Amino acid sequence: MERKYNHRSRVKADLTAILRKSWYHLRLSVRHPARVPTWDAIVLTAASPEQAQLYEWQLKRAKRMGRIADSTVTLAVPDPHGQRIGSGAATLHAILELAKHYQQLSLESQCRNSQRKEPSPSFIDLIAKKHILLLHAGGDSKRVPWANPMGKVFLPLPYLAADDQDGPVPLLFDHILAIASCARQAFQNEGGMLTMTGDVLPCFDASTMVMPNDASCIVTVPITLDIASNHGVIVAAKSGISNDTYSINLVENLLQKPCLDELVRHQAILDDGRTLLDTGIIAVRGQAWLNLVKLACSSQSMISELLEKKKEMSLYEDLVAAWVPAKHEWLRSRPLGDELVNSLGEQEMFSYCACDLLFLHFGTSSEVLDHMSETGAGLVGRRHLCSIPATNVSDIAASAIILSSKIEPGVSIGEDSLIYDSFISGGIQIGSQSIVVGVNVPATSDTTERVPFRFMLPDRHCFWEVPLVERTERVIVYCGIHDNPKIPLSNGTFCGKPWRKVLDDLGIQDTDLWISENTLEKCLWNAKIFPILPYFEMLTLASWLMGLDNQINETLRSSWKRSQRISLEELHKSINFPHMCLGSSNHQADLASGIVNACLNFGLLGRNLSQLCQEILQKESTGIEVCKGFLSHCPNLQAQNSAILPKSRAYQVHADLLRACGNEEMALETEQKVWASIADETASAVRYGFKENLAGSSSWFASNPDNTSGCCGESIHHRTVKIELPVRVDFVGGWSDTPPWSLERAGCVLNVAITLEDSLPIGTVIEIEKGTGIFISDDVGNQLSIEDLSSIALPFEISDPFRLVKSALLVTSVIHEKILQSVALRIRTWANVPRGSGLGTSSILAAAVVKGLLRITDGDESNENVTRLVLVLEQLMGTGGGWQDQIGGLYAGIKFTASFPGIPLRLQVIPLLASPQLIKELQQRLLVVFTGQVRLAHQVLHKVVTRYLQRDNLLVSSIKRLTELAKIAREALMSCDIDALGDIMLEAWRLHQELDPFCSNEFVDKLFAFCDHYCCGYKLVGAGGGGFALLLAKSAESAEELRHSLVNTSGFDVKIYGWKIFLEN
């Protein structure tokens, strides 16, 4: 098949969708790696041992923040002796060091020592079976000098930051991890390595990536010729495999920064006039990976030779060329080229062209700002974990991005500027399109000054601070956004002005900056321009050097000349990384502490205090004491805000603070109060006075006649009621119906009542007869006779098979003495569906019993009343369900239900008038399948509700999205757009897994993967974890094919149920 490349436009909205999907996959792989495989090891290359130390700190942070699974080995590998050896040799060195690391871990586990320098053959085989992510993050970041201290891969990138407002600021590294997590599936169970660069975010759906076996693969994207002329270009074969999103073709040649003639001569121009850009992503798999591991594990002598000869081996020119026969002759003339060809040359390299890939390069400071300012407003978080003053005491542009920073009153910040990890005191003015990182501007210590110190950073400037080794001072560094430190003196700039003008304006000579006569090329990188002085003196000289003082100031010039000065090059080798990490951690902890303190004192506990306290605890010296101080606020929380703050939230905050302080025992005791409060709040929202009735108050019965029987016990001789109900399947919206969410926020659910195998599967028969007491039985042979009605009291044992019926007796007040003084009650229940079905069985059975009890006693058996009573009943039982299940069974057909919080809770059930055409198509295309997997909804529910009470932002945004999808799905159904419903089901299923990764399992994943070819949508019903699945086929024909395939596939022991929409009242 000839190569074809998609011409679809890549709009900015795609970036948000791709990143959100990738982040979902990353979180799932970290939280449940047994289901969603993750990387066995993540390795970063570093320029020096000191930078590697910083990277190790960042890797530990990523694990703590849930970016990397606990099971993943992490390693930062510096270039040997801090000397540059090239990205290709650094790749071999990183693999070698990882093999040594695994070998050392094995020896340590066996309490053995070894002097072996190279990995043994057994560890070579072990590494060859591992799945490795390698990020090239070394280098000196000359074009983004302010990122040099932190490493460019760890620069802040607040995409999707608003999704988790109390979480850490997302970094470029975090987004790369998210994209890479989706590519892990391409290796399947075959060992391999994915290599990426630390200054590029390649945005594409890597979950669809496929790789040829036993080969290397380079990810490419079609690009215009003007851009390609400055990058690497891949020449791919004309024939290959292609579809709408990708193409796979054999690589025939590699070109580096080719001119037009080269592109034409090598037939590198595609039919649409573009060419294939090398994205820097290389995957190696199977035999090709094994050969690379063998080469790496014997590469010590090769690396030593490179060091001795001061040569470099490039990954993208040299090492990759070994897999491309057309480059072999050229490669053999390169350093160690023969070794590369002989070791790797038997395997091939393929181009995986991701047609819609967005190539975000962070190669310059201006590119960093562009990627933050030109994207959609919903993508970039412009305020995150920051403290900013009121608008009447500061001037901060709305488009400014302020991350992990504290801004004092009297500060001005211009448009599109980035402030990160900083403290800015009053009197500081920061221009537009500027970058300020790691700056701590203290308040002036000179109290005799009447006018406070003022400093202005001009537009389009970078400004940062760096701690130095063996010094207490932090040096202040600055340059223009567009300054290129690598450009020589003749054409270079400093703070946006040509060097010659800078020298003339300041009255200094180039010998003042480039003191050494051995300087090969004079440029900003090696100019000794930044003075090391007391803080405010450095600020004063910064203003002078940036040209804000137009007069030649002899005093400032003399002060600058006398000072010890440092260049960017020297700075790169003198950073005190441990001090920088400690300072950043303490700064983050102080910010988190301020947020928690404000939340407790002034707010309504709307922040995720559990998450913020984890940040506070990183301040090892005082973190736990700070958290203990917050505990003193807890007794007053409810009293201060009793009218609007739910007790359940106040108790949850108390439990979270206790846990942060290490008091697990008291935290568990407090959590019991949380669940008791939820039940109490639900009862209060459903019906006034309900809690008093449960406590046994006889006055409640007298004042609430609507809840009781309309006839007295003496007048009833014999009466029988039979209630039969359908089950429900939910399309979307579940969880928004569950307390406490539904008591505090609006909920929306779209579900449908169905019969199974032409019958109503859930029901009860209730009889009143002469005698006394209550007799209960179910469909599995359990029986219970109750003579003493006072024994029906809370709490019920979880193992009690009749706690549902007992709870129904309580909520309907049937056990009141006036009703059962002289009659007996016989209740029989059944549910002809598999246990743990997810079809709302428990709630619908409760609805049947409640409805039957109310009917037999002439109570209010309206669906609305029954729905409310069942909502309370489930809280009494401890299962904590919502309202959608009973509504699904009580109301016929398809319905859209909305709830509105308040006292009382308001429910609006809107039946959808489905056309015969819609009903027919749904019943033809939708398969209702029992997976055979048993689910326990209350376990999932407990975790989800706890996360909601903690105000987990990811959970809150997920449930909000589910309610939006319910509204969209309603419109899709009414428009007979069943394909759109399928897309909504898929997104809903993704969101359910975001809420709890254990709502699925390996069997369900395999089932859905098998069905994907036939279906436009699928999901488990209810809370997930097992039970029934909905499989929405692409057509009636696809449904029949899928039905036949499932029946005849031995790997899936599932049962396909016949079903119909229940339309009767």
Image: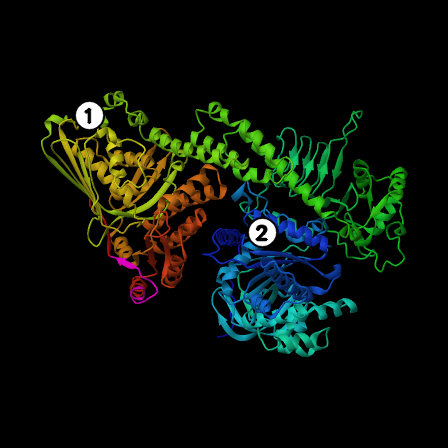
Residue at the far bottom in the pictured view: 329
Q: Is residue 928 above or below residue 555?
A: below
Residue 66 shows up from this direction: yes
Residue that carries the numbered disc 1 in the rendered image: 817
Of all residues, the one furthest to the front in this rendering is 111
Question: Which numbered disc covers residue 174?
Answer: 2
**Up-down relation of residue 362 to residue 774 (above or below):** below
Q: Quadrant of residue 305?
A: bottom right
What x and y, as percent, mark residue 85? 73, 64
Horizontal side of 711 relative to 672 (left or right) equals left
How many numbered marks have been drawn onto this rendered protein structure?
A: 2
Image quadrant in which the C terminus is located: top left
| Marks 2 and 1 close (CB-CB < 8 Å) | no
**Does residue 264 appear left or right of residue 1020 in this picture?**
right
Q: Give, as a three-letter code, the residue at label 1.
A: Glu
- Decide whether residue 69 is among the magenta residues: no
* Front one among 835 and 856: 835
Q: Residues within 10 Å of mark 2 (few under 14, many from 20)?
A: many
Disc 1 crowd, CA 10 A, few/some/many (<14, 14-19, 20+): some
Q: Residue at x 47, y 65 (%)?
A: 244
Please state if 640 lies on the left or on the right of 401 as rendered.
left
The colour scheme used here is rainbow
Along the line of sight, the residue nearer the viewer: 38 or 752: 38
Magenta run includes residue 1056: yes
Task: Reply above or below: 699 against 938.
Answer: above
Residue visible at 58% across and 29% down in the picture: 629
Question: Residue 510: image x %, image y %?
Answer: 88, 52
> Which stretch is magenta?
1044-1057
